[in-house]
Amino acid sequence: MRLQRSFTATKSLVFLGTLCAATFAYAAQVAGTVTNLSGPLLAKKPDGTVKVLSAKSQVEEGDTLITEKDTYARIKFVDNSEITLRPGTQMKIDSFSFDEEKPENDSATFNLVKGGLRAITGTLGKRNKERFGMNTPTATIGIRGTIFVAEYIPPAQPDLAAYAAASVASVGSYSNALPVSDAPAGGLPLAVLPMRETGSLLLAQAPDGGRAPGLYVQVLDGVIHLSNRGGSQSFSAGQFGFSPSRLLPPVLLPNNPGIRFSPPPAFSSSTGPQTGSGGNLTNSSNVDCEVR
């Protein structure tokens, strides 16, 4: 009897040890830390749970970060790179792996679902730039050691998908515009798309007078590379770009199409976790709140 109980206890310990080891093995990789906040920041986990983050909160691989309408949030990653999210942004950390001693395992892939951000390259992007990627609905952003701003404007309704397929035309010749037949089903004909002139380009304009849906980029330092099914284009410091659709190549814009990125003054400091004056998350002892 004692032998049987001992055997049963041993099996239980082995099972618990295996379970703990498996849990540890599948634990999410810590990618970075929230250093600055000006309002609420949420992290949606792969299992569907949602956490309200505060300054000093960790973010993990697989998290979808969501900023509220008045929130700027700066994340410092473990390789010393930084991403600052503007209000109304959703960005997923698809993968993040960094070990100072193992550059062969570097990986950083993000997905900008909507909204905007400013990114500053860290060690990973400098030593393995081909291992960094920022995916968006219309193009993938690659880096060459850089600081850049990206903003994705999604279509407001199904008909606006036409703008993504017929948004770039030559000012001098409409024959260079994408044929109406190539626009998505249900899209508006090119003839009825309101257009506005931007230097040597015509960009489709949303009915409310705002910018057309698509990805807008601004390079502050270094070089970025936009690529999609339509082609690719590099952009250097001081340049602006636009990617209207996965099917059309990214284009160089002659001037700022309306990109604005103005985080609170406190965000210009990198002294550690802070919150802006508009936030109520000023106590460094705040803990994450999980919502199920």
Image (cartoon, rainbow, N blue to C red):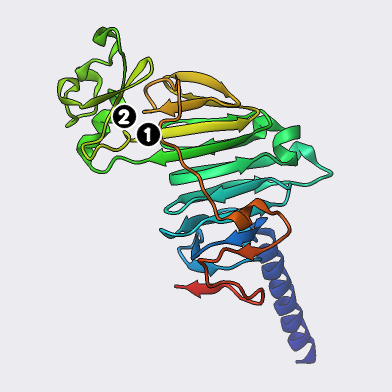
Which of 70/12 is in front?
70
First in sequence, mark 1 or 2: give its number.
2
Callout 2 crowding tier (Cα within 10 Å): few <14, some 14–19, many ≥20: many
Check disc 1 and report the residue beneath it. Answer: 214
Q: Is residue 156 above or below residue 162?
A: below
Q: Is 66 situated left or right of 173 in this image? A: right
- Mark 1 touches mark 2? (CB < 8 Å): yes
Q: Is residue 196 above or below residue 259?
A: above
* Residue 164, numbered label: 2
Amino acid type for the residue under numbered disc 1: Gly
Q: Secondary structure at mark 1?
A: strand
Q: Residue at x 49, y 62 (%)?
A: 47
Q: Is residue 59 above or below residue 133?
A: below
Residue 230 percent coordinates (x, y) = 41, 19
Q: Quadrant of residue 210?
A: top left
Q: Residue at x 72, y 76 (%)?
A: 11
Cα–Cα span, label 1 and label 2: 7 Å
Which of 121/91 is in front?
121
Which of 12/285 is in front?
285
Q: Residue at x 41, y 32 (%)?
A: 138
- Tell me if residue 17 can be seen: yes
Q: Residue at x 69, y 36 (%)?
A: 125
Quarter of the figure that contains the C terminus: bottom left
